[in-house]
């Protein structure tokens, strides 16, 4: 979100300042509860498609997308209970989202709106894109409410929405940064490249749509439609209209999702025009690289520039492909995906290695201590792969989604739900003075982004297709939905995933039915065993969906058994930081060492992993209740006994370094930095024979 490539947006407000600001807030007032399931009052506005209705739309509404192979199921159709993600989501609802509401208030985000209608005397505060913080928070609430009514959260959101729409101008424009003394700068070409006007609008649309799908309330959605239909479409686009550039891709996703519920072709066409760039706005190449916009998307051959912008542009382009089937887009998307997964993605699913410009680096430029790995970029990676999965049904995209979700995304929020990582390095030394988790950043894009991701998580578990249903993710859960032919379907999962690989899935169609159940076999496993009603089925392959085609009856049981053992991961030799080092993975989880768990006085830089001849047997597992409950790995590694070398450089004497055995304890990467400040590393020296 920064406007200049060399200025970091990770300027944060310290915990003490935030807490002090919070202490000055009046007690929060909660408006009257809204009864669960109550139908909204009729509201005027543009017509919306009614197939499916608002309650039945998923994270994306792909019901009529001609080039989507899979269709989303609504968030409300899946209930996650117990085990791994249920605990995370409950903390998100009870602590993260309410505390972020208070921090938005304490740091002036809502006063930016109130000052425009005479309800606050505070000056505009926060960066140029501060309105988007409110919209992403509203989207998080919308996804939470799709899983069930939470009257207090709904009341908070409705108050925010009322205050947002109150400042909308008669012409449809709504952006607090450019609605006062900065009005002359509005939508000027230079403002579009740095001012985040369209970025804010994109998040407004996504927040409004999520809230509409939860409640049927169109207030914010209608404001977004007015902004698009009354202000944007009549004035910006191909000549003779004024030129347009996204600056920070996001509007593309918002416009296309709006098109999916309005059917207004102009919204899709404008998204396509923005994706191709407007030649009338002349920009230096370095700027279009950084923005990942302003030139034809289909001319891109590699991922570069600002990582979040690049991921959001790829999301919008995939959405555009699913509506148009343009082969040039599909070719480009696959080229970029190959570039990312083969040369530019961390083992955690994080992307964006450079702090300078929050950018992708060159191929194989994946430093550990200096890794940026912004939480928003990992979320963007998951969002993009979700769309690529919808277009193809290919499990390679689900593997990347899962890698990012369990590691690079999950690490972004503390286990107590009130501290956040903006960046997610793969090695850390607290002696630098860096405080990796904070309650608030003045650029607070990541916290509500994490909150909306956890809120929407049930919608990622399944998809439907013309011939059946796809199971993407595993956790204790229950699906209550239907096949695309209308047949009711209940699917129940019982599992201790990701700690072990046994998953029992009970399939109960409303009537005896023929369809395919596509069971995902994760790419991280070496073997998988599948049976239905205790009859063994052959042919399941890691990294693919295993189609089980049969006549299903209520109570049929699928048993999935995945081999879950510690694995030693090595990087491509061109990744300089990881030369001679290995990482530990077990199931979908990447593990790390924190110095606090190792013997006293041991430096992580002197530790080596000894995989032996059978690496999986060199680790013992232990489930601990601390840090929310987790499975840790114990390993007898080696400690290099280095002499005290005072000079920076010394002559090599030729002697082999002595080692001694040492007990090591590995924890899941997502759980690091949840105790005292301590060193951490993912990639550890490999003991040389």
Image: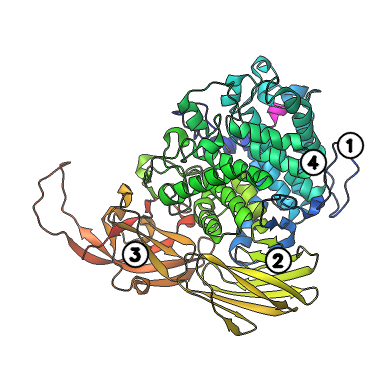
Q: Nearer the viewer, residue 599 or 80?
A: 80
Cα distance in 3D space between marks 1 and 3: 64 Å
Give the residue at mark 4: 262
Secondary structure beneath dot 4 equals helix
Cα distance in 3D space between marks 4 and 3: 57 Å
N-terminal of the pair, mark 1 or mark 4, is 1
Q: Which residues are magenta?
A: 110-114
N-terminal of the pair, mark 1 or mark 3, is 1
The answer to whether the residues at label 4 and label 3 have Cβ atoms under 8 Å apart is no
The answer to whether the residues at label 1 and label 4 have Cβ atoms under 8 Å apart is no
Please state which of the two labelled residues, at mark 1 or mark 4, is closer to the viewer. 4
| Position in image of residue 220 (x %, y %) | 78, 37
Crowding at mark 4 (Cα within 10 Å: few <14, some 14-19, many 20+): some
Magenta: main secondary structure = helix
Give the residue at mark 2: 467
Image quarter of the N terminus: top right
Can residue 113 be found in the magenta stretch?
yes
Secondary structure beneath dot 3 equals strand
Q: Nearer the viewer, residue 241 or 98?
A: 241
| Position in image of residue 468 (x %, y %) | 70, 67
For residue 102, above or below residue 286: below
N-terminal of the pair, mark 4 or mark 3, is 4
Cα distance in 3D space between marks 1 and 2: 38 Å
Image quarter of the C terminus: bottom left
Secondary structure beneath dot 2 equals loop
Give the residue at mark 3: 664
Please state which of the two labelled residues, at mark 2 or mark 4, is closer to the viewer. 2
């Amino acid at each position: 979100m920064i406007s200049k490539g060399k200025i970091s947006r990770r300027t944060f407000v310290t915990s003490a300042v935030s807490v002090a600001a919070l202490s000055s807030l009046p007690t929060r007032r909660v408006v009257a509860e809204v009864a669960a399931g109550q139908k909204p009052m009729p509201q005027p506005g543009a017509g919306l498609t009614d197939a499916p209705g608002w309650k039945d739309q998923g994270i994306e509404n792909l019901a009529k997308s001609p080039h989507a192979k899979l269709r989303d199921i609504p968030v409300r159709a899946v209930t996650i209970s117990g085990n791994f993600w249920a605990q995370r989501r409950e903390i998100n609802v009870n602590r993260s989202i309410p505390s972020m509401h208070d921090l938005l208030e304490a740091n002036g985000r809502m006063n930016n709106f109130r000052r425009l209608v005479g309800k606050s005397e505070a000056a505009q505060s926060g960066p140029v894109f501060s309105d988007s913080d409110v919209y992403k928070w509203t989207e998080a609430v919308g996804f939470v409410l799709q899983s069930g009514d939470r009257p207090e959260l709904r009341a908070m959101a409705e108050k925010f929405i009322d205050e947002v729409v109150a400042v909308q101008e008669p012409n449809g424009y709504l952006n607090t940064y450019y609605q006062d003394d900065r009005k002359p700068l509005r939508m000027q070409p230079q403002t579009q490249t740095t001012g985040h006007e369209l970025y804010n609008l994109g998040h407004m649309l996504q927040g409004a749509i999520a809230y509409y799908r939860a409640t049927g309330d169109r207030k914010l959605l209608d404001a977004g439609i007015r902004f698009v239909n009354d202000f944007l479409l009549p004035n910006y686009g191909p000549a003779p209209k004024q030129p347009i550039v996204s600056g920070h891709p996001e509007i593309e996703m918002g416009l296309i999702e709006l098109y999916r519920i309005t059917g207004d072709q102009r919204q899709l066409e404008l998204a396509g025009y923005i994706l191709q760039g407007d030649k009338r706005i002349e920009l230096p190449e370095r700027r279009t690289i950084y923005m990942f916009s302003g030139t034809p998307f289909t001319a891109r051959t590699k991922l570069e520039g600002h990582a979040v912008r690049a991921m959001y542009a790829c999301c919008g382009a995939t959405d555009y492909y699913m509506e148009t089937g343009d082969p040039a887009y599909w070719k480009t998307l696959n080229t970029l995906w190959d570039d990312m997964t083969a040369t530019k993605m961390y083992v955690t699913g994080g992307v964006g290695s450079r702090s300078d410009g929050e950018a992708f680096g060159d191929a194989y430029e994946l430093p550990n201590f200096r890794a940026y790995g912004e939480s928003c970029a990992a979320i963007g990676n998951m969002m993009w792969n979700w769309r690529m999965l919808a277009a193809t049904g290919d499990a390679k995209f689900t593997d990347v989604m899962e890698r990012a979700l369990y590691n690079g995304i999950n690490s972004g929020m503390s286990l107590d739900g009130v501290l956040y990582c903006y960046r997610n390095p793969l090695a850390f030394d607290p002696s630098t003075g860096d405080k990796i988790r904070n309650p608030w950043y003045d650029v607070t894009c990541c916290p509500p982004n994490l909150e909306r991701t956890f809120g929407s998580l049930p919608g990622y578990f399944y998809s439907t297709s013309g011939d059946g249903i796809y199971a993407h993710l595993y956790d204790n859960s229950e699906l209550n939905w239907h096949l695309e032919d209308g047949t009711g379907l209940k699917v129940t999962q019982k599992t201790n995933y990701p700690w072990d690989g046994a998953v029992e899935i009970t399939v109960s169609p409303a009537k005896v039915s023929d369809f395919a159940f596509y069971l995902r076999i994760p790419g991280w496993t070496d073997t998988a065993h599948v049976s239905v009603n205790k009859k063994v089925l052959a042919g399941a392959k890691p990294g693919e969906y295993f189609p089980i085609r049969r006549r299903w009856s209520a109570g049929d049981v699928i048993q999935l058994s995945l081999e879950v053992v510690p694995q030693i991961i090595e990087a491509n030799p061109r990744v300089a930081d990881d030369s001679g080092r290995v990482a530990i993975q077990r199931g979908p989880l990447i593990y790390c060492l924190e110095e606090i768990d190792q013997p006293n006085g041991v430096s992580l830089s002197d530790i080596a992993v000894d995989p032996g001849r059978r690496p999986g047997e060199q680790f013992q597992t232990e489930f601990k209740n601390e840090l929310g409950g987790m499975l840790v790995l114990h390993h007898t590694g080696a400690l290099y006994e280095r002499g005290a070398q005072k000079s920076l450089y010394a002559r090599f004497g030729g002697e082999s370094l002595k080692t001694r055995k040492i007990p090591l304890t590995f924890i899941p990467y997502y759980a690091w930095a949840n105790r005292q400040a301590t060193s951490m590393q993912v990639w550890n020296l490999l003991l040389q024979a």
